Image (cartoon, helix red, strand yellow):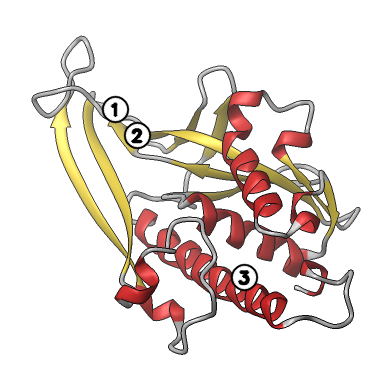
Amino acid sequence: MGWFMRAQETESAGQAAERADLSVLLLQGEDMIEQLGRAHMSWGLGSADRWDLDQTTGMITWTFPDRTATAPAQILGSFSPASRSWLWAWANQSILPDMSRDARVFRDWAEANGQPSLAQPRIEADETAAATLVALAVRVTEATGYYRGPGGNSAVIITFGPVTLTSADGSVSDVDISVSQRAPEKWAATRRLGLSAQAPTEDPRGQLSVTVAVRFCRCGSRGACCGGSRVRS
């Protein structure tokens, strides 16, 4: 995290508080990624035969022998171990603008909260630094799904929304992942994207919980499920 505020060797009290708040967001983001990973394992994330991302529809698809899983997706960025660099999706000309909305949300947040080094198009980063960027972005955008798509020379970091499972017989189930934060009331007003005046003394990793609810239903010919329309984020 040295590049958060590396431009200044000494910090004021306010700057120290901002860095402490970043540390809180980082811990929360790391915990979110860990818990979301466990939650999404309930339908098989990480064990698919293949995955595909269609930028024109904004949907990611995982293919299994007996079913497919689909979800609306966003691209945060890509990490290249060879060049030791991170490239934000909004700076990648091969990524459609609609696929980089969340990356732009994080860029705007970093600029508005005095962290311009986090909003550079390309950032020098090793695995640890890239993981830090991802954790912060997941926390700030409040993502409900995280996937590291393997590639040739780089890894694509993808966040995704509600997952739909379609079995070979046509039956459909929805996987609803929600992230809730249990925090002391004094921090509640600043939990969404903002930075509080100072970090809480307790370990913030204990304030997050991920709950999983799975609905099973069969779609009609027009795609109406569970007695109504399917909700997309």
**Residue farthest to the left, as pictured:** 227
Helix, strand or loop for disc 3: helix
Helix, strand or loop for disc 2: strand
Q: Residue 119: percent from the left, percent from the top?
A: 75, 49
Identity, as a three-letter code, of the amino acid under mark 3: Leu
User: Mark 1 or mark 3: which comes first in sequence?
Assistant: 3
Q: Is residue 85 above or below residue 71?
A: below
Q: Residue at x 84, y 54 (%)?
A: 123
Q: Residue 100: percent from the left, percent from the top?
A: 63, 34
* CB within 8 Å, label 1 to label 2: yes
Q: Residue 188: percent from the left, percent from the top?
A: 35, 67
The residue carrying mark 1 is 168
In terms of image quadrants, where is residue 39?
Answer: bottom left
Q: Is residue 99 above or below residue 157?
A: above
Cα distance between the residues tagged 1 and 2: 6 Å
Q: Is residue 105 above or below residue 208?
A: above
Which of the pair 2/194 is nearer the observer?
A: 194
Identity, as a three-letter code, of the amino acid under mark 2: Arg
The residue carrying mark 2 is 67
The residue carrying mark 3 is 22
**Residue farthest to the bottom, as pictured:** 201
User: Mark 1 or mark 2: which comes first in sequence?
Assistant: 2
